[in-house]
Amino acid sequence: MQDDSITKGKEITYAERQLIERWHNKEKLSNRQIAQLLNKVPQTIHHELKRGTGSTKDQDKVLCNSRT
């Protein structure tokens, strides 16, 4: 049986992406540990790390696109 307390179908926010990056790179937490902290499944964390979307470059792109 699946745990209903895990958020399902909701996008990762920019703030969550920053946390994932920090916890993974600086604090060396595992995907499972990060997933528990964010109430997500470990596979979601894996996909975010694989995409590499925690950088400020991505946020800059969003800001530039929203201004046009």
Image (cartoon, grey):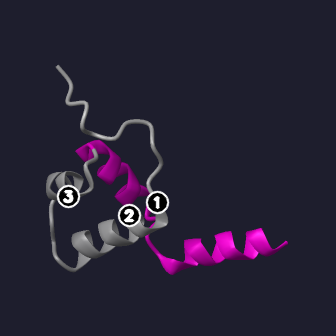
Residue identifier under label 3: 37
Mark 2 or 3 closer to N-term?
2
- Density class for disc 1 (Cα within 10 Å; few <14, some 14-19, many ≥20) is few
Which residue lies most toward the top here?
Answer: 1
Question: Residue 11 at what x, y percent from top left?
Answer: 47, 48
Question: Residue 36 at what x, y percent from top left?
Answer: 18, 52
Residue identifier under label 2: 16
The answer to whether residue 1 is magenta is no
Q: Contact (CB < 8 A) between labels 1 and 2?
A: yes
Residue identifier under label 1: 13
Q: Amino acid at mark 2?
A: Glu
Q: Contact (CB < 8 A) between labels 1 and 3?
A: no
Per the rendered image, the range of residues in magenta is 41-68
Distance, label 1 to label 2, CA atoms, is 5 Å
Q: Tell me which residue sits at (51%, 79%) in the image.
A: 56
Front-most of 13 and 22?
A: 13
Q: For this view, does 58 lie left or right of residue 15?
A: right
Q: For this view, does 36 lie left or right of residue 67?
A: left
Q: Which mark is residue 25?
A: none
Disc 2 element:
helix
Q: Tell me which residue sits at (24%, 37%) in the image.
A: 5
Q: Quadrant of residue 2?
A: top left
